[in-house]
Image: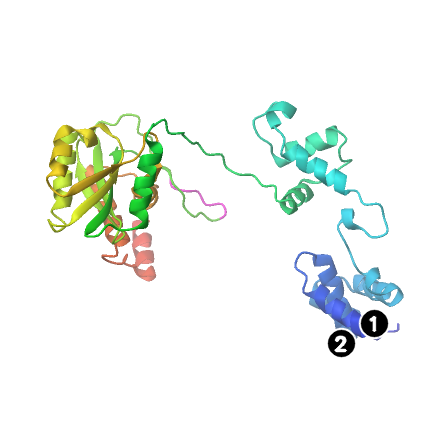
């Protein structure tokens, strides 16, 4: 049997085939281009099949198509882009699919949100499209920049002095006052002794560790009074059993002792009751402390809030502390690492494996 080989390539065909070979979004065209180029390099159908993971028969079919019709004979396109045939997704149809996806699912299907299977089913039942797979629908929405987004809650502040307080805090964040120190203070808690869910890696067929259920919590709670130093980007604080005005004033005095007396402390904090006590305001007026209260229902202006998210994730999630001392130690260890006071120690992998085998 005569060996099937590719005819000599024209310069523009060779450039086109090299581009097709590098395509990542069209695996069919990439395969066909490799077959043609390998055949032109002198390989037979059997060797080409082993190289590109296809049968020798298919390699010969591709070579014959190229010899007869050129690049158009081996090019493949998605079914809505097939050449010389009526396109199934016209511009009007694409616009209508996007309009349906952005419409209210409550009004159309009586549900609160869309899913790809439900959107596909609706499009077919309404005869908008004769048929479409879920994967092509997903890719189509992606090309139209229509994606699922998580909804978020938002509270509008009812504070009549909102803009005045907002601008004062924003000015403080933008520029450090002369001879001053910018701090953010807030309470983190209450901290119960309870199992906290989180995330962990698990291999195929592997189960994750189960956490106990804790319906009764009789060990009390702790509160973490935290302060974020805007200048040094450090987070630290104290643990207390309560968070009344007495504990808060003692915490402010502890913060005041960490800085020179002549330095003015500019502190951002929310409108929690103990922060507004007369004793607290009187002490601040006589100790070079100036308060910047966030507007009502706008505690997001306090920069310390975003640092609590990382603290919760890396010190509390996926944990089951049995005592407040253990929980406090974990939080303090994270704070030491976060503030750059020491690097997390790396245990030797072989030593860890020996310990695990002994425990098993």
Residue 130 pos. (x, y %)? 78, 35
185 in the magenta segment = no
Position of residue 47 in the picture relative to residue 189 (left or right)? right
Please name whichever residue, 163 or 76, is drawn nearer the observer in this view of the structure. 163
Q: Which color scheme did the rendering employ for the protein? A: rainbow
User: Residue drawn 84% across and 45% down?
Assistant: 86
Q: Which residues are magenta?
A: 204-209
User: Can residue 255 be seen at all in this image of the molecule?
Assistant: yes
User: Residue drawn 89% across and 65% down?
Assistant: 68
Q: Main secondary structure of the magenta part?
A: loop
205 in the magenta segment = yes
Name the residue carrying label 1. Answer: 6
Q: Which mark is residue 251?
A: none
Residue 249 pos. (x, y %)? 13, 35
Position of residue 121 in the picture relative to residue 283 (left or right)? right
Residue 223 pos. (x, y %)? 21, 35
Position of residue 163 in the picture relative to residue 287 (left or right)? right
Query: Is the residue 210 above or below the residue 73 in the image?
Result: above
Crowding at mark 2 (Cα within 10 Å: few <14, some 14-19, many 20+): few
Residue 283 found in image quarter: top left
Q: Which mark is residue 41?
A: 2
Residue 301 found in image quarter: top left
User: Residue drawn 58% across and 41% down?
Assistant: 147
**Mark 2 to mark 1: distance in Å?**
9 Å
Query: Is the residue 132 above or below the residue 46 in the image?
Result: above
Please name whichever residue, 172 or 275, is drawn nearer the observer in this view of the structure. 172
Q: Secondary structure at mark 1?
A: loop
Which callout, 2 or 1, points at the residue further toward the start of the chain?
1
Please name whichever residue, 204 or 88, is drawn nearer the observer in this view of the structure. 88
User: Can residue 302 be seen at all in this image of the molecule?
Assistant: no
């Amino acid at each position: 049997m005569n060996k099937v080989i590719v005819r000599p390539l024209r310069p523009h065909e060779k450039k086109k085939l090299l581009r097709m070979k590098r395509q990542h979004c069209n695996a069919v065209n990439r395969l066909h281009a490799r077959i043609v180029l390998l055949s032109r390099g002198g390989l037979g159908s059997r060797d080409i099949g082993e190289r590109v993971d296809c049968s020798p028969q298919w390699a010969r079919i591709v070579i014959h198509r190229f010899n007869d019709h050129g690049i158009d004979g081996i090019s493949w396109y998605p079914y809505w882009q097939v050449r010389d045939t009526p396109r199934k997704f016209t511009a009007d149809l694409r616009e209508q699919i996007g309009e349906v996806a952005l419409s209210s699912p409550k009004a159309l299907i009586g549900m609160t949100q869309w899913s790809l299977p439900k959107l596909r089913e609706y499009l077919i039942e309404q005869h908008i499209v004769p048929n479409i797979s879920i994967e092509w629908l997903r890719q189509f929405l992606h090309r139209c920049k229509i994606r699922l987004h998580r909804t978020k809650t938002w509270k509008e502040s009812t504070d009549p002095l909102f803009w005045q307080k907002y601008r004062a805090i924003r000015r403080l964040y933008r520029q450090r006052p002369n001879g001053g120190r910018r701090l953010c203070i807030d309470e983190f808690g209450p901290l119960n002794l309870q199992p906290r869910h989180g995330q962990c890696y698990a291999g195929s067929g592997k189960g994750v560790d189960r956490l106990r259920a804790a319906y009764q919590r009789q060990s009390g709670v702790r509160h973490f009074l935290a302060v974020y130093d805007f200048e040094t980007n450090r987070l630290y604080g104290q643990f207390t059993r309560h968070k009344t005005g007495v504990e808060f004033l003692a915490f402010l005095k502890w913060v005041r002792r960490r800085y020179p007396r002549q330095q003015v402390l500019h502190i951002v904090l929310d409108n929690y009751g103990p922060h507004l006590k007369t004793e607290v305001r009187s002490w601040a007026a006589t100790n070079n402390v100036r308060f910047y209260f966030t507007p009502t229902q706008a505690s997001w202006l306090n920069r310390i809030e975003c640092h609590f998210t990382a603290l919760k994730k890396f010190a509390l999630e996926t944990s089951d502390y049995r005592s407040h001392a253990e929980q406090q130690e974990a939080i303090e260890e994270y704070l030491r690492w976060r503030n750059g006071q020491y690097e997390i120690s790396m245990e030797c992998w072989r030593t860890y494996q020996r310990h695990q085998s002994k425990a098993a």
